[in-house]
Image: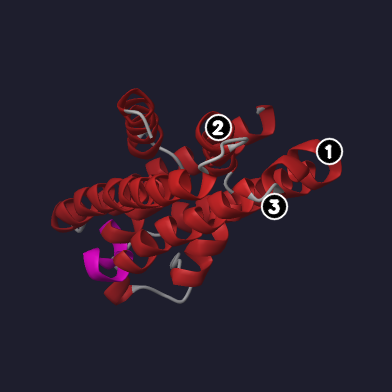
Amino acid sequence: MPPSELTALLLLAASMSFSPGPNTTLSTALAANHGLRPALRFVLAVPVGWCVLLVLSTAGVGAAIVAAPLLLWLVKAAGIGYLLWMAWRLSSSAQMASLQSPQQLQVGFWQGVGLQFLNIKAWLLALAIVAGWLAGRDDLTERLAVVLPVMAAYAFFSNLLYACVGALLRHWLAQGRRLLWFNRAMATMLALTAIWMVAA
């Protein structure tokens, strides 16, 4: 891959991975509520799920979903519903995980992997990469071997950074009603992402 194309890929990966979205919001919220170690399950799930999504998009699944309005609508509807459900669960959490009722929002590894398939931002990024760097290239396999680890690294480190921020805020959030308001702010971000998905 020429240096100019690699530079463009790195810039796209940085802007998409480190900007707020459902993954980074959940990484922050999970670490703030449960601590960094439990949040790492989700942090690790994001690159795994996203890389599977990219491979499927490269194989044509992404284009097939975009070309079929009903399938695209189903993916969007499922993603919107899941984000709103998580926002609702998160908005009422007012205590740290050690004191929580079973209603506490938790997202495990496989849920995190599956969430990538309901994340319109992840689909758009995968399709942009396929269109710009992979589709129709004679060296598709070699390019994919470069793109996958780059994107996996960005997905991992962006979510790890947001999780670390959440973990650093954990002690401060434990005082008074700060955690409730923090969770409501994170829930609002998830709900706004869902609204954006409706308009996208």
Q: Residue furthest front?
A: 138
Residue 78 numbered mark, or none: 3
The kind of residue tagged 1 is Pro
Q: CA distance from mark 2 to mark 1?
A: 19 Å
The kind of residue tagged 2 is Ala
Q: Give the left or right position of residue 185, taking residue 54 as reference.
A: left
Point out the frontmost of discs 2 and 1: 2
Determine the main secondary structure of the stretch shown in magenta. Answer: helix
Label 3: few (<14), some or many (≥20) within 10 Å? some
Task: Locate residue 37, reporting x and y percent.
Answer: 24, 70
Q: Quadrant of residue 143?
A: top left
Label 2: few (<14), some or many (≥20) within 10 Å? some
The kind of residue tagged 3 is Ala
Is residue 92 visible in the rendered image? The answer is no
Label 1: few (<14), some or many (≥20) within 10 Å? few
Residue 142: within the magenta? no
Which element carries disc 1, helix, strand or loop? helix
Q: CA distance from mark 1 to mark 3?
A: 14 Å
Up/down of 103 relative to 52, above or below: below
Up/down of 37 relative to 58, above or below: below
Residue 69 numbered mark, or none: 1
Which element carries disc 3, helix, strand or loop? helix
Question: Which range of residues does the magenta coloring cover?
Answer: 32-39
Question: Which numbered disc, 1 or 3, marks the residue that appears first in the sequence?
Answer: 1
Residue 128 numbered mark, or none: 2
Task: Locate residue 174, reporting x and y percent.
Answer: 20, 59
Q: CA distance from mark 2 to mark 3?
A: 22 Å
Task: Locate residue 41, reporting x and y percent.
Answer: 36, 69
- 34 or 96, which lies in front? 34
